[in-house]
Amino acid sequence: MHTTHPAPTAPTVDIVPIRRVLVSVFDKSGLDRLAAALKAAGVRVASTGGTATALAKLGVTVEDVSAITGFPEVLDGRVKTLHPSIFAGILARGDRPDDLAVLAEHRIARFDAVIVNLYDFQSVIAKPDCTPAQAIELIDIGGPSLVRAAAKNHAFTSIVTSPAQYDAFIASVARGGTTLAERRQLAAAAFEHTAKYDAVIARWMARHAGLVAEPSAERPVEPHAGDDPPLPARVTLDLEQRLTLRYGENPHQSAAMYAPVGTHLGLAGLTQICGKELSYNNLLDLDAATRLAGLIQDPAAVVVKHTNPCGAASDGTTAGAVAAAMAADPTSAFGSIVAVNRLFDRDCAEVLCGPGLFVEVIAAPAFAKEAVEMLTTRPTWKASVRLVEVPAGDPWEATAGLELRSVAGALLAQRPDDECDDPATWRVVTKTAPPPALTQDLDFAFTLVRRLTSNAIAVCHGTSLAGAGIGQTSRVDAVRIALEKAGPKARGGVLASDAFFPFPDSIELIAKAGIAAVVQPGGSKRDPEVIAAADAAGIPMVFTARRHFRH
């Protein structure tokens, strides 16, 4: 039997000496030491535009790209390097005689390395006065093409995309050339570089075009509820690691915090002033605490344990809110996360420095210097507490306005439930309306319940959380737990439910506890029964027509 064998292949090239390079960089930091090394090694340098001028000033003899292509820069510099004399010199395979013959026929010289970084599109669009025309001019065309070409041909061509890579590249030039392993690593970094760049442009272009979704024949955009625009058909994420965490929810799970490149709002932009490193669970609790604090208009404090508020209050002063929030459930508040929505000042620190108190993390938009000094010197837990500044602003911009949550193998996306409710739109459904003096209390309670885990009930006395029923599989159990937590504080207080009451049995418990008014979304087919029970008990009830489940 006749057996065919594959034709022998040329051995893989390992060391590629660096004799000729193309340099075109927007970020010119480190260019002086790169130029000195290339000049010392006798490397021929081709360049264009501002980079060529900068290299010439550094004493490097530069071969102008226009001289290589025989064609001048045109269209205000939009077309410079896009020419076969450049790209064939980058893409030619050194082990292919036919490739080398093409180079010889057209008198094209090879490039052993391409040193390119791209226009800083991210910084330009971040400026408040950036116009679309300015942004569009900063969309690099030739740069990404050069990077991708060199990265594709990394078997023979080195691609350097960051000044941070210069020192290692210079060392390789000095010792005789780059290794295949080095070129592979450089190529991987290069493709990551262009992927990030394209992701930033894609997000900006979608906003510029006024699009959040573009239907396609394969996947049309589904109808959506409310006044929100349709959800995106595609979301491009470019995430970078911001924090390495000791472990995840449990010690056997590795973990880190990632954030979209260029995003520095919300927890993506946190600044830790002092204390031990933040943990995975700390960050989940921080998210719960800061988002709820941000929903409250008056000076407020929120105390969170295991992602649920165990204390929350608003007051005329932030310190007053902190004191009331910590007093709501002192047992649960021990070892908790505390967030405020104003400057954390000396008076706030005095409250937390009281005897018997211990908190893991304190979050605020800013800290007064005296507060930091007090918290890090006076309490017995001074070495443990983390003080974290969390900047205000829309943290969802980089994710197309979507809140993302992972499930096995996929991401769920939704518009964040971060808009404040308007009590003016609520409807009194019982014969008796709540007294005007309770309007603020009902608003506060309904604000709190939206950040509790469903099924959720919040009992408030004034503008302070008195008791919460969290994460129950039946609403009546959530009511029972919230009232038990509130104890005597339930009498004369208000109760909020994150979703409708499916049966009137909860009203019986609410009446026995002496609740003065109830706020709930409504929407159950048994609403008439629930309303009748409230009327019989003399409890005013308000429907909001908006549910606030949080799973």
Image: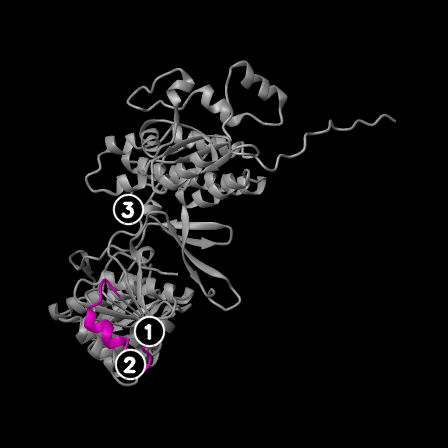
Do the CB atoms of the residues marked 1 and 2 lie less than 8 Å apart? yes
**Residue flagged by tag 3: what amino acid is it?**
Gly
Work out whether residue 337 can be spotted.
yes
Residue 226 marker: 3
| Mark toward the start of the polypeptide (1 vs 2) | 2
Residue 379 marker: 2
**Residue flagged by tag 2: what amino acid is it?**
Pro
Q: Disc 3 versus disc 2: distance between alpha carbons?
A: 49 Å
Q: In which image quadrant can residue 375 be found?
A: bottom left
Q: Is residue 366 magenta?
A: yes
Range of the magenta residues? 364-385
* 155 left or right of 66 in image: right
Neighbour class for label 1 at 10 Å: few (<14), some, many (≥20)? Answer: many
Q: Disc 1 versus disc 2: distance between alpha carbons?
A: 9 Å
SS category of the residue bearing label 2:
loop
SS category of the residue bearing label 3:
loop
Tell which residue pokes out farthest to the right in this image.
1
| Mark toward the start of the polypeptide (3 vs 1) | 3
Image location (x, y in percent) of residue 87 = 47, 24
Question: Which secondary structure type mostly characterizes the magenta part of the structure?
Answer: loop
Task: Please name whichever residue, 23 or 249, is drawn nearer the observer in this view of the structure.
Answer: 23
Closer to the camera: disc 3 or disc 2? 2
**Considering only vertical position in the picture, is 507 above or below 405?**
below
Q: Which residue is mark 1?
A: 385
Q: Disc 3 versus disc 1: distance between alpha carbons?
A: 42 Å
Do the CB atoms of the residues marked 3 and 1 lie less than 8 Å apart? no
Image location (x, y in percent) of residue 493 = 21, 75
Neighbour class for label 3 at 10 Å: few (<14), some, many (≥20)? Answer: few
